[in-house]
Amino acid sequence: MQSPKQTVHYRGRIISVTTDEVRLPNGHQATLEVVHHPGGAVAVAVDAAQRVCLLRQYRYVAGGWLWELPAGKLEPAEPPLLTAQRELTEEAGVRAARWQSLGAYLSSPGVFSEVLHLFLATDLEPASAAHEPSEVIEVHWIAFEEACGWAERGEIRDGKTALGLLRARYALAADGASGPPR
């Protein structure tokens, strides 16, 4: 398969924007706008009391405050697990002894190249948080099932958080840690 003709329109600190001339599997030629993002990693941290770490974070683009799991951008050549571990410590002030992959997810595959890697983090211990100046974050520990209910009812609007919580519920149930799946 031939590489697409790509025109760069913007290259920023995190993203770049291109138009790509591609031939689709049906033979149609199309010009697609693509936002390139390095991807990220997400930590679903569940403590011994079956509480999950949720951040109440101010997001300018979303128009206010969102409930989110600790997450961050992959650094160049950084494995997703290391990103999740770093972000959990920096944002939530905890470390985890056990990590389990919950798979990856595409945030908006029609236009973004971003892939988010989800991880379940357990066996937690305190660590020193290190919020960045551009982060406005409150750290909360919410009953895990209550947070899953928020995701099911649409009270959590962030896709990575809703999906991460529900995949973690399934993984925990499969391990026998929190009863049968709902």
Image: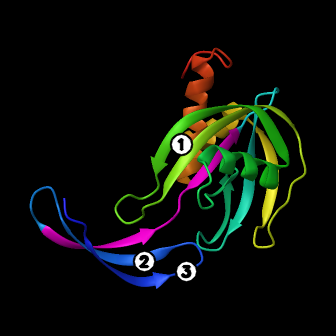
Quarter of the rendering containing residue 130: bottom right
| Tag 3: amino acid | Gly
Q: Is residue 153 visible?
A: no
148 horizontally vs 105: left or right: right
Identity of the residue drawn at 53% across and 58% down: 39
- Find numbered disc 3 in the image and state the secondary structure of the residue it sits on: loop
Q: Nearer the viewer, mark 2 or mark 1?
A: 2
Percent across and percent down for residue 22 are 21, 68
Percent across and percent down for residue 7 are 33, 82
Which quarter of the rendering shows the N terminus? bottom left
Query: Would you call the spot at circle 2 few (<14 residues within 10 Å), some (14-19), or many (20 or more)?
Result: some
Identity of the residue drawn at 49% across and 43% down: 104
- Find numbered disc 2 in the image and state the secondary structure of the residue it sits on: strand
Quarter of the rendering containing residue 60: bottom right
Give above or below for 1 relative to 45.
Answer: below
Which numbered dot is residue 17?
2
Identity of the residue drawn at 39% across and 82% down: 8
Give above or below for 125 relative to 65.
Answer: above
Q: CA distance from mark 2 to mark 1?
A: 26 Å
| Tag 1: amino acid | Leu
- Find numbered disc 1 in the image and state the secondary structure of the residue it sits on: helix
60 horizontally vs 88: left or right: left
Q: Specify which label sits upstream in the sequence, 2 or 1.
A: 2
* Residue pointed to by mark 1: 163
- Which portion, as a residue range, is magenta? 29-44
| Tag 2: amino acid | Val
Q: Is residue 41 visible?
A: yes
* Residue pointed to by mark 3: 12
Magenta residue check for 66: no
Quarter of the rendering containing residue 146: top right
Query: Would you call the spot at circle 1 few (<14 residues within 10 Å), some (14-19), or many (20 or more)?
Result: some
